[in-house]
Image: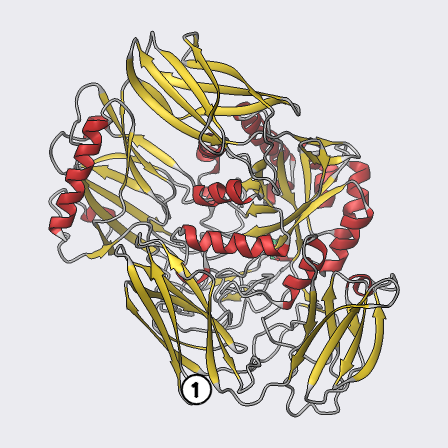
Amino acid sequence: MKCKSNLFLAFLFLNLMTFAQKTTIIELKSGWKFAKGQNEKAFENSFNDSKWQSVTVPHDWAIYGPFDKEVDKQVTAIVQNGEKVATEKTGRTGALPYIGEAWYRNQFSVPDLNKDKKVLLLFEGAMSEPKVFVNGKKVGEWNYGYNYFYFDITDFVSANAKNNLAVHLSNKGESSRWYPGAGLYRKVKLIVKNKESIDQWGTFITTPVVSDDLAKVNVKTKISGENLRIITKIKDANGNEVATNESNALFGNEFEQNIAVKNPHLWSPETPYLYTAISQLYDGDVLKDETSTRFGIRTIKFEPNKGFSLNGQIRKFKGVCLHHDLGPIGTAINKAALRRQLTILKDLGCNAIRSSHNMPSLEQLELCDEMGFMFLAESFDEWAKPKVKNGYNRFFEKDAEKDIVNLVHATRNHPSIVMWSSGNEVPDQWGAEGVKRAKWLQEIFHREDPTRPVTVGMDQVKATMESGFGALMDIPGLNYRVHLYDEAFKKFPQGFILGSETASTVSSRGIYKFPVEKAVSKQYDDYQCSSYDLEYCSWSNLPEDDFILQDDKPWVIGEFVWTGFDYLGEPTPYDEKWPSRSSYFGLSDLAGLPKDRFYLYRSRWNTNEKTLHILPHWNWKGREGQTTPVFVYTSYDSAELFVNGKSMGIQKKNNTSPQKRYRLMWMDIKYEPGTLKVVALDKDGKAVAEEEIHTAENPYQIKLEADRTTLEANGEDLSFVTVSVVDKNGNLCPTATQQLNFSVNGKGIYRAACNGDATSLEQFHLPTMKLFSGKLVVLVQSTTEAGAIELSVTGKGLKSAKIALQSK
Ligand code: GAL
């Protein structure tokens, strides 16, 4: 290990020598030591960390559990949910041990450090309240755990020596409404530059003029130094240079270049075309710095009565809200996990993401640029007035401006970002102070980025109508409150409304409850919610209430469904029930497995592929002869249902109820085991597609399906293997709950498993878990060595299974 890290340093040294004139970025990934429970005073430069745990960063110290009812038990009334009386909320933040203090330590060297260099230390997020020390001296602190920040540590580092880096983190209880994660959960980077160089986040690229044959690319570059010149080259997606521009006209500390790109390829969700701007900074003929910035050419407009258009085409946001945790691996950022989420969302037909309720990871933005998702980048869940005692309210007055500045500077070149959000359901919606704050924040966004509008997710719509809060926003965003859309449209001057947060319908994958009926905040003894998708919260609504607004009101510019995936914490409607510890809102569960509701949205959103999905499952031993409604979520207009070959009649979508407009429902089906078949019909009644499900016999064997079988041998790539149990004929056993065991051989490791059961207290990183509704997902991680990997899954009484993966 030692020898490996020496080799690594030698490699770095060589790299630094070769490119000494340019900026060098070193990710501090390995070599970290971690200890929890140390208070800040325990720090000394000579602190003995030999007994500390060795970890790699990104790291989430709390995800390993165990789940514990007592962790962050909040006795509170959740005001925004309409509660008046305080009750005990367990699992609100996931019941995982995120609270407390901890230290991370590492060492680094800066081999060619000299008086012409500067050294920055960049954190892409640290949960939370990081205090950073280099060689025993404090270099700075940053309160907000979700933001990107950096410090200039030039005066703290020494050349050709090991520099000690220590980061102290502290998470208070009652500081969050969901699982915030804990630790250095995003990347840490050391950046070595010339003093004369392009500033960190100093490049700002916009495309103010775009037509079919020409785009004006405006590149502003902030630099440090004098008498320098800049050359910016624009390369297309194949790396061919398409334009270049040189300038020596420095205004203040900024170059501004306008570069013409002929016949531009426009960025859109369907054509996520990316250009790269390479900017080189010269002093005479000496190259002082070079940066590479990816960007897209596109236009956005929000216009009264017309709505939102991208590249001149009106379109609606078919969006989902996402919290930042990645289920079983917690908040530690992982590109493979993010890519899988987005792949699932592409299949859904989703075109937009809202990073609720904080700054997104840079990796997520990179993937949205590449894969084609529009982005609503949010900043805060609280302003000055608290939702939770120890939330951002403690820092708002002092930090809000610098937090927004960093959000904008670090992310503004991502073409995916089409709007900013300065807040979500902030209690400051009430009162004159809140109006001032809304204006202040919006103006900071405008000052830092004049190209994108700003929204706030508003739930106190009446209050914001009266106070002027809603009228001043660039984009009035309504969270729920479907009954107020019309009024808000009339009262607000903008001429359009965004469904910034919608639905909050709840369900558990593969669980169905009888009788089938609409219900508000319904609870059951097993702490699950029905996948007939008729249960919602007192403040929210069913999907169709939003669909109707989206379809019938041209001035509604889209929606962001709460949520794309289940997340850790906020186990509504079981906030007070243990052991519920994760949400029920997702279209997919915590393991990323689609629930039925996924297909309801897919049937509207995915316009490239048809949807024909039947629910419930058909294994109802004991319900023989009892009414067991069958729903079909489909992009077809009508269909005929057959139970064991007998027609149950044709259903056609119609306007007699919101549900009947979007779902096909056979409410009176009497259960009998066998085959349930649906045949979709075209306008002339001709059969055009069919689907069937079967009553499964006893669980017989394990089945494995990997999302990817070839991984990158980089020690962080992941294959998500869906594990299901099937009968002798290959039918999914939808009620199977067997305990399974996992082992990984070869050049991979077992990383985690998740079954999507919001009440499961099994720890994700242990190689055993029970199935939930016949399925779970195992995450296999590559090592840094290439080669064959094999995952084996066994379970008592079941034929086991193996799957071969490989890493390259
Ligand atoms: C909203 C809130 C979200 C989440 C959701 C649950 O009011 O913005 O963060 O709490 O309710 O329905």
State whether residue 494 is above or below residue 672: above
Horizontal arrangement in the rendering, residue 749 relative to residue 275 (left or right): left
Q: Specify the quadrant of the image occupied by residue 282.
A: top left
Judged from the image, the quadrant occupied by ligand 1 is: bottom right
Q: Specify the quadrant of the image occupied by residue 599.
A: bottom right
The amino acid type, in three-letter code, at marker 1 is Leu
Horizontal arrangement in the rendering, residue 401 relative to residue 376 (left or right): left
Please tell me how many numbered marks the rendered image carries. 1
Residue sitting at x 82%, y 48%: 552
From the image, which quarter does the C terminus lie in?
bottom left
Disc 1 secondary structure class? loop
Q: Which residue is mark 1?
A: 798
State whether residue 304 is above or below residue 626: above
The structure's colour scheme is: secondary structure
Q: Is residue 516 visible?
A: no
Residue 278: where, in percent of width, then height? 41, 24
State whether residue 29 is above or below residue 230: below
Between 731 and 314, the one lying in front of the other is 731
Residue neighbourhood size for the residue with mark 1, other residues' Cα within 10 Å, grouped as few (<14), some (14–19), many (≥20): some
Residue 403: where, in percent of width, then height? 45, 34
Residue 79: where, in percent of width, then height? 60, 55
Q: Is residue 28 visible?
A: yes
